[in-house]
Image (cartoon, rainbow, N blue to C red):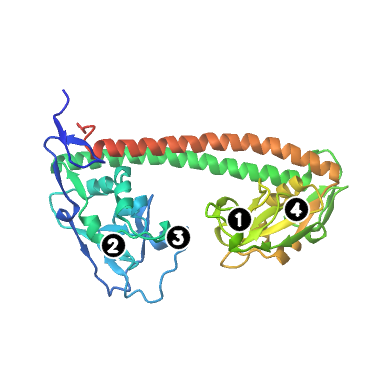
Amino acid sequence: MSRAMKDSGIPWIGVIPKEWETLKIKQVMRNKSIKGFPNETVLSLYRDYGVVPKDSRDDNHNVTSEDTSSYKLVDIGDFVINKMKAWQGSMAVSQYRGIISPAYYICHIKNDGVDRRYIHYLLRNDSYKAEYMRLSTGLRVGQWDLNIDDFLSIPMVLPPVPEQQRIAEFLDRKCGEIDEAISLQEEFIEELKAYKQSVITEAVTHGLNPNVKFKDSGIDWIGKIPQEWECTKLKYYISVKSGDAIGNEMISEQGQYPVFGGGEMIGYTNIYNSSRNDLLIGRIGARCGCVTMPLCDSWATDNALILSTTICLLYMYYLLIGCDLNKQNTSNAQPLITSTKIKNTVVPVPPLSKQRQIADYLDNKCSEIDGLIAIKQQKIEELKDYKKSIIYEYVTGKKECIF
């Protein structure tokens, strides 16, 4: 028999079970700001992973201040909020004691009649994000700021404690299963990417015919190459530039020129302009060494190098991927590729007819692999959507946990 429901009075929640409460977040938690514990473990907040020790992951590039005495103390069970990314769901109950940037809000859950895990699932679920966005202020997305008083005044729903615990236990188990399935798909994707890289590297270093005569290239990472190939520096086949400066008057609000950020189109800016007969190489940071072939006539970039070549453009594209510029040329703590490093990279170069054969082969082969990757990525998106839906359905009482 279906349970009795009532209107929660909260637009993004809708109906809830009759015995559930509606209250303000401030009735459950309060803001706190305790500083002066510089020797505690520095923590980081991730939208996907929650609060973790900063040194437990290598993908957080935010620099920790030398003086952490102004960092805020986080106790186990505190609710941590990134005020600039709250609208993305960047908030979580912490399972660790430590300190975090003073730019974050720390809330102590003061009500003993709540299960912290339930609060964690409720306030992070997608139905709340639009409200966080509505309340955030600022001129630009990256500078939006959610005021703590506005956050604490947001309404929430609260089941009886036993039901909170059942919901939290169910979601812990179910979300764990979904996360494992997502991780498995991500492993498949990484294997496919590694396979794609090996296919490209093999083709641009050894060609497509294993029965030809080979000679030693003299380069460790290349090994033997077909006898008719040359092994020489890229500078004899390419020119590299940073682009032609263009002024603000050439950029419309919508963006006259698409912007490439070393591997992907990311927005619009007014730094450089070039043509579609070039390649783009990410110069610095996370996109260092990424190679892109722009598919439009004009574009702009502010953190990449523009490469033109006298040989087959598509072969050069795969050659640069195959030789892994980032690995060949980067030795700094901060990844950085310069035009000099690119020009001095030694690469194998086949005759023009072979370049075209290899490029055509890799186009077809990489397209097949990319298709498999796309299927895995679609599966991940489906799993993520499923996870979001079950969290919403259970934390709002649309479905009931009955053990």
Q: Which element carries disc 3, helix, strand or loop?
A: loop
Residue at position x 68%, y 36% in the image: 365
Residue 270 in percent (x, y) is at: 59, 60
Q: Nearer the viewer, residue 78 or 217?
A: 78
| Outermost residue toward the right in this view | 228
Quarter occupied by the C terminus: top left
Amino acid type at image mark 3 = Asn
State the CA–CA distance, disc 2 to disc 4.
52 Å
First in sequence: mark 1 or mark 3? 3
Crowding around mark 3 (Cα neighbors within 10 Å: few <14, some 14 to 19, many 20+) is few
Q: Which residue is mark 3?
A: 60
Q: Which residue is mark 4?
A: 222
Residue 189, can we see it?
A: yes
Q: Which element carries disc 2, helix, strand or loop?
A: strand
Q: Quadrant of residue 260?
A: bottom right
Q: Which residue is mark 1?
A: 262
Q: Which element carries disc 4, helix, strand or loop?
A: loop
| Outermost residue toward the front in this view | 249
Amino acid type at image mark 1 = Gly
